[in-house]
Amino acid sequence: MNKKELFEKAENVIDRRRQIAKTQAEDRRLEVYEKIPVIRKYERDLANDMVDITRLILEKKKDSSSMLYQIRDKNLQTQQKIKNELLINGYPEDYLDEKFTCKLCNDTGIYNGERCSCVYEIIKKIATDDFNKNTGIKLCDFNEFDTSYYSNTESTLGNITDRQHMANIYRFCYQYADTFKVNSPSIVMLGNTGLGKTLLSLAIAKKVLEKGYTVVYGSSQDYFTRIQNENFGKSKSNESTMDIIKEADLFILDDLGAEYETSFNSSIFYNIINTRLNFDKPIIVNTNLNLQEIRNRYEDRVLSRLMGQCKTLQFVGKDIRQLKNK
Ligand SMILES: [Zn+2]
């Protein structure tokens, strides 16, 4: 999708929001006319005041200003009468007002003569959805994570059993998603294949998306190939993958290490990490590689940034897919 299409789509969303706000207000007005008929009369008075004011201004008479004040006072009184009637009849006093989604621009898309911030929010959301649609991800729910697959007797990491350890990781991830902010910490999920790293990061993605944040998710192989193609001019896309990664509120890089081992890919990874961490934006990295393998593959500076600025979650246990097959 190019910029022009994005803006058109965003404007359609805003138009629809405005229309819905107006229709709903109109429905409430008809309901109120039915129950409190005098309000219809008051509203007609208000409309007549506007006609009188317009006429006075056009006539430009000398003593018009005192008359303008009179009409204004009468108008304010009528507005107050409407509010009182609504309150007496058990409605909120702003019941007849249009309830716009964006309080800045009243869903017009223009604020102080410029494009309102809500337009950019919508564009970000559309671009993210579009991107994820192309990536073909299927989100998960936290309740799909089952701790009974982790041993209740083995203690890979010492003090507590694997099951208790994984229950702690689960709680951390749930809490993380539940309290997500644009400056939440970054996470590295370490551990062998089939221990639930992808499941938990897709559950985080879903919850964070539902809170209205933008999340971009994909495997390292996908991203690195896209970025490589863009760098060598092979891509037809109008948006740069690096820009999308930079813009997202949360970026999740799945299966680091599955991509081809080249120095180009290594530098892409370093760029991604830098881009996110320099702007204090969270990234979640999943990998089957252990720390030594990460160091061998991506240079020390990557490992030190990752370990220095990310919360590390070490997944333990046996491959769940194999356990399920038994
Ligand atoms: Zn707005």
Image (cartoon, rainbow, N blue to C red):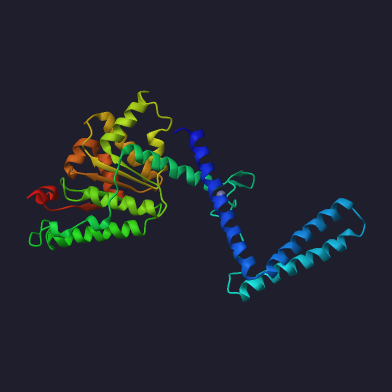
- Does residue 193 appear to the left or right of 65 in the view shown? left
- Does residue 323 appear to the left or right of 252 in the view shown? left
Q: Residue at x 44, y 45 (%)?
A: 125
Q: Which quadrant does the N terminus fall into?
A: top left
114 to 240, vertically: above or below: below
Q: Residue at x 53, y 42 (%)?
A: 12
Q: Residue furthest front?
A: 34
Quarter of image, res 172: bottom left
- Image coordinates of residue 36 in percent, x first then y, are 65, 70
In front of the other: 321 or 302: 321
Q: Is residue 191 visible?
A: yes
Quarter of image, res 32: bottom right
In front of the other: 94 or 301: 94
Quarter of image, res 171: bottom left
- Image coordinates of residue 314 in percent, x first then y, are 19, 52
- Image coordinates of residue 54 in percent, x first then y, are 81, 54
